[in-house]
Image (cartoon, rainbow, N blue to C red):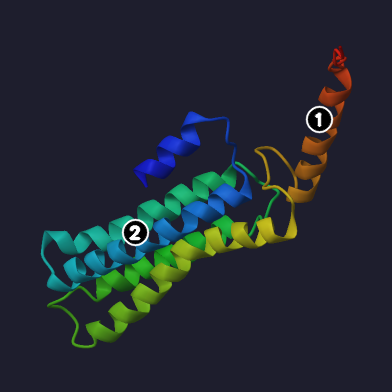
């Protein structure tokens, strides 16, 4: 991931969907490994068991903040992920090891709700990228309008640039 960060931040690479797709595979691998570690810590109990509910809450809070930057794009997204996350955290807290006898099943439902809460927003954004040539920009109403604005700006800037004449000898 460090290599990706250095390469993509060193140049003039913007948030193009191709580059986000390139990062998806290592992020998925890190997510899977992290989830396994968090689940193991949760099942072991103790103070480390609180990390999983906290990570779910923090991840969804960050996703809700990012979604709030685009208020007219999928307005249902932040409330839906928030509801799923609240459900997941409550279930994970109720099913803490050493408590309820049916805690294992409740914990699995909480884990499923956690996964749904954490993955819903990225899945919705990824689906929007498949429908549109560029992702939405802050303040834009829809991805399609944002793409139209970007294309119009690029055409305007290209028209303003003076054309160079090539020298032939």
SS for dot 1 = helix
Q: With 159 as the anchor, is 113 left or right in this view?
A: left
User: Where residue 32 is drawn, which disc sits there?
Assistant: none
Q: With 49 as the anchor, is 78 left or right in this view?
A: right
- Taking the spot 21% from the left edge, 60% from the top edge, the residue there is 50
Q: Nearer the viewer, residue 103 or 11?
A: 11
- Taking the spot 29% from the left edge, 64% from the top edge, the residue there is 33
From the image, which quarter does the C terminus lie in? top right
Residue 86 x, y percent position in the rendering: 41, 64
In this rendering, the answer to whether 1 lies above or below 54 is above
Residue 79 x, y percent position in the rendering: 55, 59
Q: Are there few (<14), some (14-19), or many (20+) residues within 10 Å of tag 2?
A: few
Seen as rendered, the residue at the extreme front is 169
Callout 2–callout 1 Cβ contact below 8 Å? no
Residue 87 x, y percent position in the rendering: 41, 69
In this rendering, the answer to whether 154 lies above or below 79 is above
Q: Are there few (<14), some (14-19), or many (20+) residues within 10 Å of tag 1?
A: few
Q: Nearer the viewer, residue 19 or 168?
A: 168
Q: With 124 as the anchor, is 105 left or right in this view?
A: left
Q: Nearer the viewer, residue 40 or 99?
A: 40
Residue 25 x, y percent position in the rendering: 45, 60
Label 1: which residue?
Answer: 153
SS for dot 2 = helix
Q: CA distance from mark 2 to mark 1?
A: 37 Å
Q: Earlier in the sequence, mark 2 or mark 1?
A: 2
- Taking the spot 49% from the left edge, 38% from the top edge, the residue there is 8
| Residue 131 found in image quarter | bottom right
User: Where residue 30 is drawn, which disc sits there?
Assistant: 2
């Amino acid at each position: 991931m460090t290599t990706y960060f250095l390469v993509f931040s060193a140049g003039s690479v913007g948030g193009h969907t191709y580059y986000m797709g390139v990062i998806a595979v290592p992020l998925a691998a890190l997510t899977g490994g992290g989830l396994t570690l968090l689940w193991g810590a949760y099942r072991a109990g103790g103070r480390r068991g609180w990390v999983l509910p906290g990570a779910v809450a923090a991840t969804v809070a960050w996703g809700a903040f990012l979604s709030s930057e685009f208020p007219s794009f999928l307005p249902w997204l932040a409330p839906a992920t928030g509801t799923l996350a609240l459900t997941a955290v409550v279930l994970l807290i109720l099913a803490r090891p050493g408590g309820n006898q049916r805690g294992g099943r409740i914990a699995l439902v909480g884990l499923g709700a956690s996964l749904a809460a954490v993955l819903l927003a990225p899945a919705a954004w990824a689906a929007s990228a498949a429908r549109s040539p560029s992702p939405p920009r802050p303040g834009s109403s829809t991805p399609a309008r944002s793409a139209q604005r970007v294309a119009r700006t690029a055409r305007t800037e290209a028209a303003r640039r003076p054309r160079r004449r090539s020298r032939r000898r």
